[in-house]
C-alpha cells in the first residue's frame, strides 16, 4: 500500500506546457464572458475567480471549464444577467436565489453575506438555490480567512456518479465539503474533498491517457471492480469508507440542496449533457468568527503548533514529507503566481475554439 | 467486494443475552452516579442519556462505559460537581467550559443553548472545553430534530489512534462528526461516523474473539497491513479515503478542539490509561433552523422523497435492502424499547463489580 501523499486534483499539466500569466488568462476569460452577454463587472469577477482556481492548481475546476460555461450560456442553460437576491433571511442565516446565474457570482455573494452575519452574531450560514457550478470549493471557503473566520462549504455535485451503498443507480453526486482554517505563519488548512475515492475528472483523465483505473475507484453494475475508464458510463464511483462516504454525500446534499430547495438525487440535471437546462444547483457556506471563542491570534498560533506537530511527526518508511490539507495548493499558488499558469495544448485548442465562436481575440 | 450494509458499531450482544428493561438499567446507572458523588438530578440525566445510547444500539458507547466513568470519577479525573458555564457568548455562538464534568451534562447543555440561539437567529453553534467523553454523537445531534432543526456535531476522540497520512505517530483521534436531519414519516437521517475505516472498539472486539482483522483496518509501523488485533498497540488505524479521512479528522479536531481551547493532537490524554487526569475534551454542536430556509413540513416531505428514492432504487446483486444512515438505530430503538436491552454476561459482570465497589444494589 503506497503511503505517498496523493494529489486531490488530476494533473493534466506537464513541465513542457507553455505558461501564461494570470493577467493574460484573466483578460481572455473576461473578454469571453462579455462576448457571451455578461455585464463587464460580472465577467471580471468570474475571470478573477476562475484564474484563481488555476493558480491554486485546481486544473479540473478552473479555466478548463470555460468552453462548457460558454456553451451553457449560449444554449440558455445559464442566465447571463441574473437578479441574484436574498429570498429568506434571519440574523445569522440567509437563502439566496441565484436566478440561474453563474455559480461563482452566486457563491461570492453568499460568502460575503455569511461573513457579514458572522461579524454581527458569531456565525453566518448562507444557502443558495438556482445557482450553477461554481468551480472549486476552495475559492469560497477561504474567503472568511481574511476576517479571522473559519469557513465551511457544502455543494451538490453537478452530476450523479455515486449510488447509495449497495445500490445500482447513481442517485448521488460527488458532493464536496470543504473547511478552511487560518493559521498565523503556516499556510491556512484547506480541506476540499468529495466523498468518493476518485473524482470523475480522474476517471476521464485515465481514459484520455489509455490507462486503467486502480481497483476501488469504480464498480460495474454487477458490483465488480471496474478498471477500464472507457466503460465508466456503465459503472459507479465508489464512496470513501464504504457506507460512510455514501452517508456523507447524502447529508452534504441535504445541507446544500434539499434545505435550499435546490436539486438533489433524481432532480439533478447533468450539466454537461443538458446544456440548455437550468440545473438548480445548491450550495451552502458558513463563516464562523474565531473571536467569538478566543482571540484570533491565539487560535492561529495554536493552529501553527498543530500543523508543525503533524509535519514534524515520525514518518512511515519511504515517506518524504507529511503534508497538510491545502499545503500543496498554497505552494502551487506561489509558484504559478511567479511563473504563470501551464496551459496544455488541448486546453489552448479548446480556448481557441471559444475565441472563434465568440469572435474575440485569442489567448496571447 | 461485499456490498452488504455494514453496522457502524461493534455488536457484542447475542440473541441469547438476557434482556433488561430500560427503566431497570436507568435506575442502576443513576444509583451508581449518586454513589460516586454526583447530584441526583445530574445522575438521572446521565442515566437517561447512557441508556438511550444502548436503546439505539450504540453498545460500545452506552452503559458499557459506566465502569470507566466511575473509575475516572473516583480517581479525580472527572469532576462530580462541576460548575458548567458559558465563558464566551455572541448572539449565535457560545463557548461552554464544562469544568471537567461528565461530557453528557456538558453537551446536553450545549445542545439546549444551540437550539435556543437557532430559534432566535436561525443557527446556533456552541463549543465546549473541559468536557469529557459524552457517549455517541447521536444523543446530541438528534436533540435539534424536535424543534424542526438540523443538527451538526463534532468531537475530539478520547485517545489518538490515527496518524496523519504518511505518518507513523497516532497524533489524531477517531474524531467523529454527525449530522441529523428530520423527515416527515420516515425515520430521521442520522449520520454518525468516525473518519477511520474501523472504530477502535471493533479492533478490541476482534481481539476478544480471537479473530483477525481485515486488511485495511490498521497498519503497523512499517506501513504494512496489521491483521492481528492483539498487536493493535503496535499500529495505527487507517483513515477512510486515505488522505481524506486524515484531513477530516484534523478539521473536526480543530472545530471541536483547538477552536474551544480544548485538547488536540499531542495534548490529548488517553482517558483509559490516565484515569486521574483531566482530558480537556472538546466538542461542538450546531442547530440550524429549517424555517429560516423554508416551511419545515415542506422540507421534511422533501427528505421523505429523497429517502424513498434511495431505498427504492436499483440494488446490486445480492443486496436485500438499501439502508439510510440512522435507519438501523431507529429500528433497534423500537425493538429494545419493547423487549429490553440485551446485557451480555461480560457487561453484567463488570456492572456487578461497580455495584460492589460503590456498595449499591446490583442491576436487577
Image (cartoon, coloured by chain):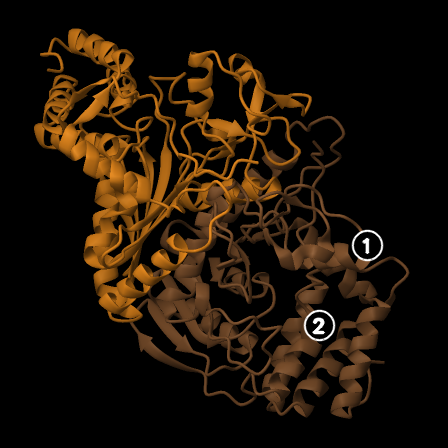
Chain colours: A orange, B brown
Name the residue at 43% across, 36% down.
A6
Q: Quadrant of the C terminus of chain A?
A: top left
Callout 1: residue from which chain?
B
* Of residues A208 and A163, the one drawn nearer to the viewer in this rendering: A208
Q: Quadrant of the N terminus of chain A?
A: top right
Circles 2 and 1 on the same subunit: yes
Mark earlier in primary sequence (2, 1):
2
In percent of width and height, residue B11 lies at 76, 56
Q: Is residue A210 positioned above or below A255 on the image?
A: above
Task: Report the Cα–Cα distance between label 2 and label 1.
Answer: 24 Å
Q: Does any portion of residue A188 appear in the rendered image?
A: yes
On residue A247, the disc is none
Q: Secondary structure at mark 1?
A: loop
Q: Quadrant of residue A118?
A: bottom left
**In the displayed structure image, the side of residue A268 where residue B18 appears, left or right:** right
Name the residue at 31% across, 70% down.
A293
**In the displayed structure image, the side of residue B350 where residue B145 appears, left or right:** left
User: Which one is in front in this view, the residue at disc 2 or the one at disc 1?
Assistant: 1
Name the residue at 65% across, 37% down.
B311
**In the displayed structure image, the side of residue A132 where residue A52 appears, left or right:** left
Which residue does the numbered mark 2 point to in the structure image? B63
Which residue does the numbered mark 1 point to in the structure image? B210
**In the displayed structure image, the side of residue A16 where residue A321 appears, left or right:** right
Label 1: few (<14), some (14–19) or many (≥20) C-alpha neighbours in 10 Å:
few
Q: Does any portion of residue B119 appear in the rendered image?
A: no
In percent of width and height, residue B267 lies at 44, 69
Amino acid at each position: 500500500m503506497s503511503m505517498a501523499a496523493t494529489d486531490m486534483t488530476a494533473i493534466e499539466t506537464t513541465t513542457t506546457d507553455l505558461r501564461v500569466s494570470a493577467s493574460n488568462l484573466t483578460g481572455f476569460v473576461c473578454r469571453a464572458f462579455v462576448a457571451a452577454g455578461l455585464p463587464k463587472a460580472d465577467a471580471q469577477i468570474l475571470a478573477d475567480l476562475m484564474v484563481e482556481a488555476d493558480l491554486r492548481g485546481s486544473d479540473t475546476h478552473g479555466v478548463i471549464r470555460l468552453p462548457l460555461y460558454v456553451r451553457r450560456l449560449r444554449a440558455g442553460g445559464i442566465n447571463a444577467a441574473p437578479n441574484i437576491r436574498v429570498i429568506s433571511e434571519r440574523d445569522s442565516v440567509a437563502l439566496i436565489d441565484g436566478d440561474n446565474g453563474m455559480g461563482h457570482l452566486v457563491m461570492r455573494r453568499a460568502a460575503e453575506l455569511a461573513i457579514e452575519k458572522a461579524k454581527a452574531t458569531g456565525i453566518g450560514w448562507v444557502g443558495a438555490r438556482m445557482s450553477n457550478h461554481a468551480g472549486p470549493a476552495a475559492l469560497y471557503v477561504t474567503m472568511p480567512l481574511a476576517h479571522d473566520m473559519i469557513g465551511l462549504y457544502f455543494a451538490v455535485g453537478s452530476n450523479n456518479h455515486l449510488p447509495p451503498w449497495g445500490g445500482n443507480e447513481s442517485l448521488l453526486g460527488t458532493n464536496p465539503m470543504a473547511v478552511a482554517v487560518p493559521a498565523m505563519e503556516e499556510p491556512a488548512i484547506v480541506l476540499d474533498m468529495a466523498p468518493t475515492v476518485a473524482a470523475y475528472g480522474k476517471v476521464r483523465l485515465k481514459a484520455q491517457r489509455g490507462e486503467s483505473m486502480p481497483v476501488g475507484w469504480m464498480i460495474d453494475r454487477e458490483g465488480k471492480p471496474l478498471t477500464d475508464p472507457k466503460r465508466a458510463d456503465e459503472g459507479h464511483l465508489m464512496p470513501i469508507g464504504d457506507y460512510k462516504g455514501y452517508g456523507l454525500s447524502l447529508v452534504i446534499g441535504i445541507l446544500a440542496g434539499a434545505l435550499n430547495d435546490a436539486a438533489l438525487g433524481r432532480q439533478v440535471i447533468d450539466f454537461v449533457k443538458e446544456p440548455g437546462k437550468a440545473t438548480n444547483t445548491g450550495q451552502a457556506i458558513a463563516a464562523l468568527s474565531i473571536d467569538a471563542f478566543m482571540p484570533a491570534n491565539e487560535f492561529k498560533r495554536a493552529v501553527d503548533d498543530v500543523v508543525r506537530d503533524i509535519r514534524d511527526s515520525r514518518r512511515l518508511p519511504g515517506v518524504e514529507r507529511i503534508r497538510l490539507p491545502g499545503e500543496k495548493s498554497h505552494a502551487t499558488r506561489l509558484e504559478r503566481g511567479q511563473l504563470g499558469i501551464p496551459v496544455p495544448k488541448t486546453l489552448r485548442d479548446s480556448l481557441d475554439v471559444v475565441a472563434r465562436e465568440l469572435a474575440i481575440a485569442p489567448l496571447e
